[in-house]
Image (cartoon, rainbow, N blue to C red):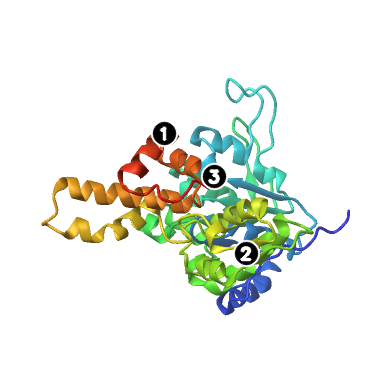
Amino acid sequence: MEPRPPIAIVTQSERMRAILSRVETIARSDTSVLLIGETGVGKELFADYIHRVSARSERPFVKIALSAMPHDLLESELFGHERGAFTTAHADKKGLFELAHTGTLFLDDIDDVPQAVQTKLLRVLESHQVMRVGGTSTIPIDVRLITASKVDLRALVERQLFRADLYYRINVFPVEIPALRERREDVPLLVAHFMRRFAPGRPIAVTPEAERAFVAYDWPGNIRELRNISQRLALFANGQITLADLPPELNGGHPVEGLIKACSRCLADGSMSYADVVTCLETNLLRQALADARGNRTQAAKALGLSLSTLRDKLKKFGLDEAGES
C-alpha cells in the first residue's frame, strides 16, 4: 500500500502552530482526543491529521457526522446489528466500531448523541467490546477515538444533557481550534492556498484592497465559508481578484446594512414626511443595485425582482437614468 499524502493544515498563526505542536506529540499515543470549535473551523481536517501522524496511519480511518444521522438509526450505525434484529435487518451488519478496528474512529458532533446511545457508547469505550443490536455475544475492538463538538460539552453536562462520565472519558486531551476571526493572519495564506487548489496552473492574484477586505471580514462560517467563496471567485477570475469581485458581505457589508447607512439621515430626521423617507430609501436601493451590477440594468433588475421596464421607469422617476446602460 502506497503511503497517503500528508494532510496540509495551512497556518502561520503562532497560536495554531503551538496547537499543532501539541497535537503531533499526542497523536503518536492512543489517547482519546476531543476537538472543540465552531462549525467550519476544520475539526475533521484535524482528526485526519491526527490519524495520519499516528502509529495507526495505515489502518482504517472511519468517520461519521452524528448530527446527520437519524437518532433511531444511530445505534445500528455505531454498533452494527444482527440479521432479524428489526424489520429491515435482512443481513448482519458491522458497525463503525468494528469497521475501525485497529484504526481510528472519528465521531463528529458528539454533542448531538442522544442520552440512550451515550450510555451504550460509554460501555463500549470502557470494555473495549461491542455488542451488535440483536446480538448475544460481544466482539473485541481496538479503536483510537477522536470526537468533536461545536459547543462546550461542560455546559451540556451541567444541564444534564450529556453524561458526565462519558465527557470525562472522551476529554482526555482537549484541543480548542480557534475561529478564523481569531487568527486573521492566516486568511491571505488560506486564500492563496484555495486559489492554487481551485485554479491549478492558472495564477490568480489578489489586489491589496481585496486582501484587506478578506482579512477584515469576521467569517462566521470559518474556513468552510472561506473555501466556498474562494472556489466561486476562482471559477470566474481572470488572473486577478479585485474588491469589486467580492460578494457584498466582504466588500461593504450586507446590502440592507449599506442601505441603512446610506439612509441614516432620512431615517433619523423627524421633519421628513413619509413620502420623502420612502423616496430616500428607494433611491439608495436603486443606486446600490446598479453599483453591485456595475451599471448593468438587466442584472440590477433581476437582483431587485423587477422587470427591466419597471426598473427603467423608476430610474427615470428618481433622476437616475442619466448614465447610459452598460
Q: Which mark is residue 66?
A: 3
2 or 3: tag closer to the N-terminus: 3
Looking at the image, the residue that sits furthest to the left is 271
Q: Nearer the viewer, mark 2 or mark 1?
A: 1
In the image, what residue type sits under mark 3? Answer: Leu
Position above or below: 252 against 326 = below
Residue located at (79% from left, 59% from top):
201
Query: What residue is disc 1 on?
Result: 309
In the image, what residue type sits under mark 1? Answer: Ser
In the image, what residue type sits under mark 2? Answer: Val
Residue 177 appearing in the image: no
Circle count:
3
2 or 1: tag closer to the N-terminus: 2
Position above or below: 127 against 75 = below
Q: Is 306 or 247 nearer to us in this picture?
A: 306
Residue 13 appearing in the image: yes
Query: What residue is disc 2 on?
Result: 191
Q: Is 209 or 146 nearer to us in this picture?
A: 209
Q: Position of residue 41 (x, y in %)?
A: 55, 60
Q: Nearer the viewer, mark 3 or mark 1?
A: 1
Looking at the image, the residue that sits furthest to the right is 1
3 or 1: tag closer to the N-terminus: 3
Residue located at (44% from left, 51% from top):
323
Q: Position of residue 177 (x, y in %)?
A: 53, 66
Q: CA distance from mark 2 to mark 1?
A: 40 Å
User: For this view, does 87 lie left or right of residue 239?
Assistant: left
Q: Label 2: state its secondary structure.
A: helix
